[in-house]
Image: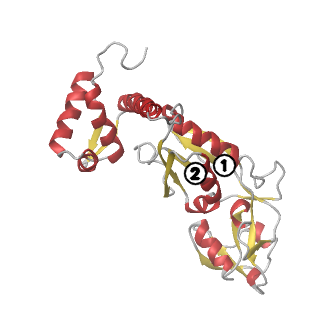
Amino acid sequence: MGVFAQMALPWADLPFLLMLTRAGTLSGAARLLKLDRTTISRRIDQLEKTLGETLFDRSNGRFSLTPYGRRVFAAAESAEQELFFLERQHEGQHKHGGRIRVSLSGHLLMTLADCFQAFMREHPNILLELTATNRILDLNHFESDVGLRVSRTGHGDLLSIKIGKPIYALYRRKDCDGAELRYIARPGEDSVPDYVLKIAPMAEICIVVDGLVPTKELIARGIGIGILPRYFGDRDSRIECFSKPLQYAGWNLCIVLRPEQRRLHRIKTFVDYMQRYLTRFADFEPESSVGEIQNG
């Protein structure tokens, strides 16, 4: 049976649950609902008493859902979505809509700008709220709905849809003499990796930088050579790939979300769209590769 199968659901208190989850603080929820903090705190306490379970963990003024709270939130959000749909039907608009908060790294945001533009044209009733961040825990704290990540680790109890292994290669600025003598290293690299020396045997570390966006910009300015995924580097006409594929062991491009969100229509629409778009990328590592990057 469902969470609420044997109880009278206190519907009037659910907006307080939804807003406090999304805001994370009483002050934030108060601004969203245009009420005072005391009222929201009292209604949440009342909801927990009615359900007989703790919905939120409180720490340093922030509220994060307990496992039971996540189940209640998922049911409440699903009900909210259906009510929104019925309202739109009444207005003569027969499409699901709403807001989707998407967190993704900066280089993926730049790479997928055309994809987001196409999605907006096809689904004008769904508003995308994009946040450039490398954090993944923001999904567990309900700060975003969907994450796009290139990672080599699991994502706990989150649903992770693996798209494929990106192809990485060495890049240099076009028509830049001497770039192969300088290597743009990643954090933790104390020397030029052997697989780079096989391609540029005279290279020495010239600078260390964290992040693909600044790495690409330094390459484009002729600072040195560096490693980029093909789907990112090939889209910049200022630079060129000059090596065979290099494989990051275990790294995958993934769509990450909470399992209970998957059935929401707006989330499903976006995830399915992104999955179709991303799987058409040609820039994924084939099974046989030339070199292997051991330190990601």
Q: Which residue is mark 1?
A: 252
Q: Position of residue 248 (x, y in %)?
A: 70, 56
Query: What kind of colouring is applied to the model shown?
Result: secondary structure
For the residue pair 252 and 109, the one nearer the viewer reads as 109
Tell me what residue is drawn at x 68 percent, y 63 percent.
Answer: 232
Q: Is residue 149 visible?
A: no
Lower position in the chain sequence, tag 1 or tag 2:
2
Residue at x-position 53% and y-position 39%: 267
Q: Is residue 27 left or right of residue 187?
A: left
In the figure, 290 relative to 227: above or below?
A: above
Along the viewing direction, whichever of 124 and 193 lies nearer the viewer: 124
Quadrant occupied by the N terminus: top left
**In this rendering, is residue 116 above or below 75?**
below
Q: Residue furthest front?
A: 92
Instruction: Answer whether labels 1 and 2 touch (C-beta < 8 Å).
Output: no
Q: In the structure shown, which secondary structural element does the residue marked by tag 1 occupy?
A: strand
Farthest residue to the left: give it: 38
What secondary structure is marked by label 2?
helix
Tell me the quadrant of the picture where the C terminus can be found: bottom right
Q: How many marks?
A: 2
Q: Amino acid type of disc 1?
A: Asn
For the residue marked with disc 2, what is the amino acid? Met
Residue 131 seen in the figure:
yes
Which one is nearer the viewer's eye here, 194 or 2? 2
Res 120 label: 2
State the residue in front, 64 or 208: 64
The residue drawn where x is 51% and y is 44% is: 125
| Quadrant of residue 228 within the rendered picture | bottom right
Cα distance in 3D space between marks 1 and 2: 26 Å
